[in-house]
């Protein structure tokens, strides 16, 4: 690039190329945010509602993404849990590629 070309600025071909790159990057960012929004809106929801006519609180346990939640729900109270839909490989790693357990590996079967 000569000094004259540098002072003149980018050519129209360069600016179109830059515009296309910026449009592609902006589109990828918008699509990523749209995917996150759709996932948040469509993720399964669990609602717990305890009747207002009840006289005492109730204790509940909820497995929230392999983390057990224990809490109390007062009469007339409601709570919601958004559940994750992502698959965890660790949950299936004990099942895939294994045959049925033998009686030696399962103490309950060998005792019976």
Image (cartoon, grey):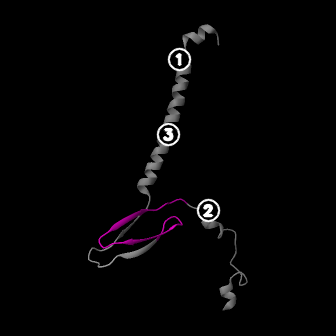
Q: Which of labels 2 and 1 is toward the front? A: 2
Q: Is residue 61 left or right of residue 98?
A: left
Q: Magenta region: which residues?
A: 62-86
Taking the spot 59% from the left edge, 12% from the top edge, the residue there is 6
The residue that mark 1 highlights is 12
Q: Residues within 10 Å of mark 3 (few under 14, many from 20)?
A: few
Residue 85 coordinates in the image, percent (x, y) = 50, 60
Of mark 1 and mark 3, the one earlier in the sequence is 1
Which label is found at residue 29?
3
Q: Residue furthest top?
A: 4
The residue that mark 2 highlights is 89
Q: Which of labels 1 and 3 is toward the front? A: 3
Q: Is residue 108 left or right of residue 47?
A: right
Q: Secondary structure at mark 3?
A: helix
Please tell me whether residue 112 is drawn above or below residue 10 in the rendered image.
below
Residue 59 coordinates in the image, percent (x, y) = 40, 75
Q: Secondary structure at mark 1?
A: helix
Of mark 2 and mark 1, the one earlier in the sequence is 1
* Residue situated in front as seen by the camera: 68 or 92: 68
Quarter of the image where one finds residue 103: bottom right
Residue 44 magenta-drawn? Answer: no
């Amino acid at each position: 690039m000569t000094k004259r070309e540098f002072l003149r600025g980018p050519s129209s071909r360069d600016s179109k190329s830059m515009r296309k790159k910026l449009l592609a990057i902006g589109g990828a960012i918008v699509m990523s945010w749209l995917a996150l929004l759709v996932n948040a809106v469509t993720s399964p929801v669990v609602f717990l509602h305890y009747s207002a006519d009840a006289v005492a609180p109730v204790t509940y346990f909820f497995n929230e993404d392999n983390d057990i939640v224990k809490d109390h729900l007062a009469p007339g109270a409601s709570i919601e849990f958004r559940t994750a839909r992502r698959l965890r490989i660790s949950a299936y790693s004990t099942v895939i590629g294994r045959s049925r357990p033998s009686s030696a590996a399962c103490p309950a079967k060998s005792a019976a």
